[in-house]
Amino acid sequence: MLSNKAIVVLIGNNGTIISKHDGDGVSTEFIEKFTDEQKPNLTTFFTKNKNHQVYILLDTIDQTYKKKTYPAMRTYDLDKIAKRDLSSDGDKEGLKNYIILKNHKATPKKSIIKRTESTSNKSDCLFITSSKSENISNWLNFIYELPNRLIGIYMLPVESYCLFRKILKNTVPNKSKDVLKIKENNIFCLVIQTKTGGARQIVFSDSSIVFTRVVNYNFEEPSFAEKYSQDIYSTFEYLKRLYIDLTLHEFEVINIFPEKASSQIMQTKNVELNVSNYTVKNIADILKINKLKIEDDNIDGIISSTFVNSKKILKFTNQRIRNNEIMYFVKLGSYAINFLLLFFLIGITSLVFITNQSITDKIDKSQDQKVIALGEFSKVKKSSLQGNYQEGDKEISLERVGDMGRVEQGLGNLGHDFIKTYSKMKFSNNFDMQFSFFSYDLISFNSYTSKNKTTEKQLKLIGKLNNKSGDIENLFTEFDNYLVEMRKNLPEYDIKYNELPRNIDFNQKYYSFPIEFRIIVKPNENREN
Amino acid sequence: MKIEKIKKKIKYSLSFALVLCLLIGALVFMYFHLNSSFLVQYEKILSDIADIKVKTQELEKKSLENKKYMELWSQITEKRKSFSGIKVEEINKLVNTLSEKYSINSPITKVNIPENFSSNIYQNETLSILYTIVEISFNAYNDVKAIQFANELVDNLHGYPIITKFEFNKESDYSIKDYFDISSGKSIGKIKAKLIFSWYVYKEGSPNLSQTNNPPKNDNK
């Protein structure tokens, strides 16, 4: 339960209680009057516990609770108006704040109490002010200088609502979570006795505080019970002004007094009053507060302990605290930025390292490859033919050999061989034919290039085939025989010729016929260029 | 808490943040700088490797070529390897000698002015190539003599004489009178021939810029 590290400075008119809350438990110290002599010890205490957040809880007499009703409006607008009203208050030094009260939804059947002003078309706001006494100022000035973080100033009656709810929740037999819903129309009066502020009545509705008043009781006095009853009645009468239909039965009183005081109250046999009596010990047991040492009949310790572990209701602050908070969050922000930057730094350092490593590996590998390539190169260089070519006694540079070799490759095969071809055609003497034209050409020869792969050597013969008989059959036979002979003697050549026309007049005599042959030397496919 | 203390802490914290930012900045710079410089180095090595590989391949290719050309060298005749250049009087002399030998009449020889053949075509490094076109027209008594004349003429030339065109035609058949005229030296023969060849010969000296002209065109397409 006591897990929050906090120090609560409970300031009242009768003195101040400083309670330290952490995992080890709760330790308290009462200071009757705050003097300069106590400051060194206190400074040491706070500095020792500088990680504990500091809450100031005020249990002073001069607290005023003033309810104001506004027309129904949006919460945002109500908030703005309440703030404006608060700032228009003349007291600039005092501690001021407000609570927007929940609208009471009056349903006729269930509702027993009807608030005079709380209707669905109105908004209520409770303004709470407390004067800043010299004692409070001294404490504040002292705490400002401490290394601890001051969270804010809170009012004990307001923050007691949490204690009240817990008590109510733990004392109703069925322990329903919605216990307060059952009693939503009731008004409760919590009567407590604190060491710092004395006895106090705190009136709560189902949702928040209604008002508080300090009542001074001396439990030793014989007239205590009577005085107590009078106070309850006068409170009830005051409440009747706010809640017209409020009955004494619906006005529940919870006393947290010493056992003796409780028995005195019970002896008055005032049956009208709906009173429940608890001792501080009872409450500690009910709320299972076992780390707190209960030394007397005052509830200060339990209140501050409940306060630390509960959701805070209303914070009072000033410019100094606000500035401190802003700076605190700026500091946290800067720490967060530092953390992020540190994280980023680690990340980028790792990235640099990894990248460096991988690039170094890459470079090393490529260097190895380079060494291998160089080795290969020198190996090839050693085995390559370089220098001069020895031809008998003569030394010829390989460049010269290459130069002439390339020319030989390009031009060496383009030499003429028509005399060989022509001599192979001696068989023509066996045929009755006369050639009148002979030509030899290099076809597709390009002198601009060394690559003349498609160049063809062509022999062209034009003449006439004689046919003494004039018979066309003989003419065809002679031509075909000549062609057969040509193909037989020139197998390595392509032979092209003009066919004898097949549509000639067969009745006519043909004693000679023009012929044309083209003998093409096939390109040497093995020729390298 | 004292606001001054918080401010001090914030100041320290922000200073630390600034230091961290500087460190991060330095690291980021280092990262990119190292990356780029390493990359440059890496790329240089890779390009070196590529260069070496190309050179190795070139060397291998050259070596193979050298081997091939060394084998080819023995097949190239001395005539082809000759550096005698192009001399018109030598051609004329040869034409005259062969004309007598093969009874060739009226030979007319035209030789173009020799030019340096572009070294780009055969990538010649140690020698230059001279180039010209020769055109010879003549009359012969018969086809065999015309062919033999052309053949022997070209065979007797050094370098690479490449016949691009050789043609002849017989205008008409010989009559008995023609034979008498031939025997008395009055006839010049009825075979009219024309020989055109491109002639490539070597010239000492490595090719220079002025020798990179394109050769005169002598193409058959």
Image (spheres, coloured by chain):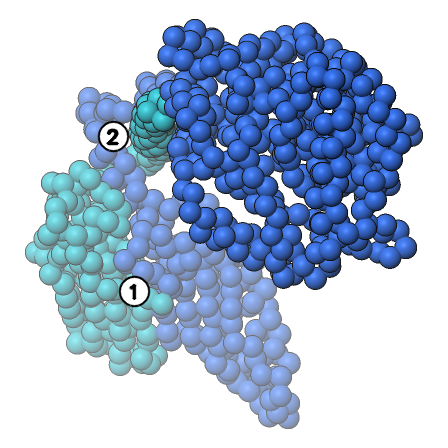
| Amino acid type at mark 2 | Leu
The picture places residue A510, in percent across and down from the top left corner, at: 55, 87
- The structure residue drawn at horizontal position 41% and vertical position 38%, both measured from the top left corner, is A93
Per the rendering, the colour in which chain B appears is: cyan
- Image height of A161 relative to A511, above or below: above
Residue nearer the viewer, B202 or B45:
B45
- The structure residue drawn at horizontal position 55% and vertical position 68%, both measured from the top left corner, is A482
Q: Is residue A45 left or right of residue B58?
A: right
Element on which disc 1 rests: loop
The residues bearing labels 1 and 2 have C-alpha atoms spaced at a distance of 31 Å
Element on which disc 2 rests: helix
Residue under label 1, please give it: B219
Residue under label 2, please give it: A398
Toward the front, the furthest residue is A223
User: Quick one: which chain is blue?
Assistant: A
The picture places residue A376, in percent across and down from the top left corner, at: 39, 21
Point out the image quarter for the N terminus of chain A: top right
Quarter of image, res A178: top right
Quarter of image, res B81: top left
| Amino acid type at mark 1 | Asp
Asked if one can make out residue A474 in the rendered structure from this viewpoint, the answer is: yes
Q: Is residue B34 left or right of residue A429?
A: left
